[in-house]
Structures are given as structure tokens and as C-alpha cells.
Image (tube, grey):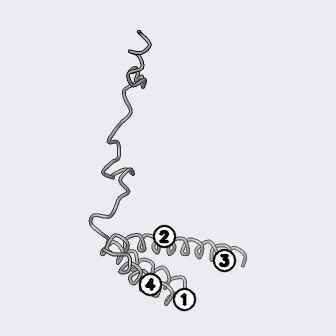
Amino acid sequence: MSVTTASYLARRAAQKQRVRILYRRSLRDTLNWAVHRHLFYQDADELRKKFDAQKNVEDLDTIDRMIAHGEAEYNKWRHPDPYTVPWAPGGSKFCRNPEPPKGIEIIYDYGQEEAELK
């Protein structure tokens, strides 16, 4: 009995994690589709209602099917050009000013070397 209970709890924990990841991805992607913040709030509220409507389902196989369906829907409606923070990998500022190669010394004295020579 304890093996069955342990496997049940492990499967439920994995399902909860998959649902949590799916919700967070969907919420972030909703922000990519919304032009204005007030539109995002409406879409986020609808998304939350969809997740809350199925919150009390207990059958493990049904939950797995619902998660697979949700992931398929997410992949179908995923934004083709999601927002990327400019300094993150893939952003417009990422590695714009890379570090200088090793062996090159940069001295930031801003003209003070001339004052020292006099």
C-alpha cells in the first residue's frame, strides 16, 4: 500500500509542477500578445479562470490528458516573436559591447596623463 501511495504522490507532484510551469509560460506569453496592460489583465483573468475551472479534478489519467492538451494549445498559440529583455541572450543589447581581448590594457585617466607630464 505504501508503494502505491508513494507513486501516487510522486505522480501528483510531477503533475502539479507541469501545471505550474504551463500556467507561468502561458501567462508570460499572454503578456507578449497584449498591446496594452489593461488588455493583458483581461486575458490573464480569463486564463486563470480556465485553470481554476479544472482545479478539483482528481483522476490522474484525466489530469495527464488535460495537461497534454494544454501544452499542445500553448505550443499552437505561442507568440512567434516573444519579447526579450534587451540585455538578455537574444536581446538587442546582448554582447553589444563585449569585453576587450585578453592582453589589451585600457587606462581610464581621461587626459590626466598630459597634466602629469608638465
Q: Earlier in the sequence, mark 3 or mark 2?
A: 3
Q: What residue is disc 4 on? A: 45
Counting from the top left corner in percent of width and height, residue 27 is at 43, 74
Provide residue 69's location: percent of width, then percent of height. 39, 80
As measured in the structure, the alpha-carbon distance from the residue carrying label 4 to the one carrying label 2 is 17 Å
Using the numbered discs, state the Cα–Cα distance from disc 1 to disc 4 in whole angstroms.
20 Å
Spatial separation of the CA atoms under disc 3 and disc 2: 26 Å
Q: Residues within 10 Å of mark 3 (few under 14, many from 20)?
A: few
- Residue bearing the label numbered 1: 57
Q: Position of residue 87 (x, y in %)?
A: 38, 50
The residue singled out by tag 2 in the image is: 21
Question: Is 49 rendered above or below residue 102?
Answer: below
Local crowd at mark 1 within 10 Å, few (<14), some, or many (≥20)? few
Comes first in the chain, label 4 or label 2? 2
- Image side of residue 9 versus residue 66, left or right: right
Callout 3 amino acid: Thr
Find numbered disc 2 in the image and state the secondary structure of the residue it sits on: helix
> Disc number at residue 77?
none
**Quadrant of the rendered image containing residue 72:** bottom left
Q: Are marks 3 and 4 in contact (CB under 8 Å)?
A: no
Separation of marks 1 and 2 at Cα, in angstroms: 18 Å
Amino acid of disc 1 = Val
Residue lying at the far left of the rendered structure: 80
Residue that carries the numbered disc 3 in the rendered image: 4
Q: Left of 57 or right of it: where is 87?
A: left
Q: Looking at the image, do the residues carrying marks 1 and 4 touch, with CB atoms under 8 Å apart?
A: no
Foreground disc of the pair 4, 2? 4
Q: What's under tag 2, amino acid-wise?
A: Ile
Task: Choose mark 1 or mark 3, whichever is in front.
Answer: 1
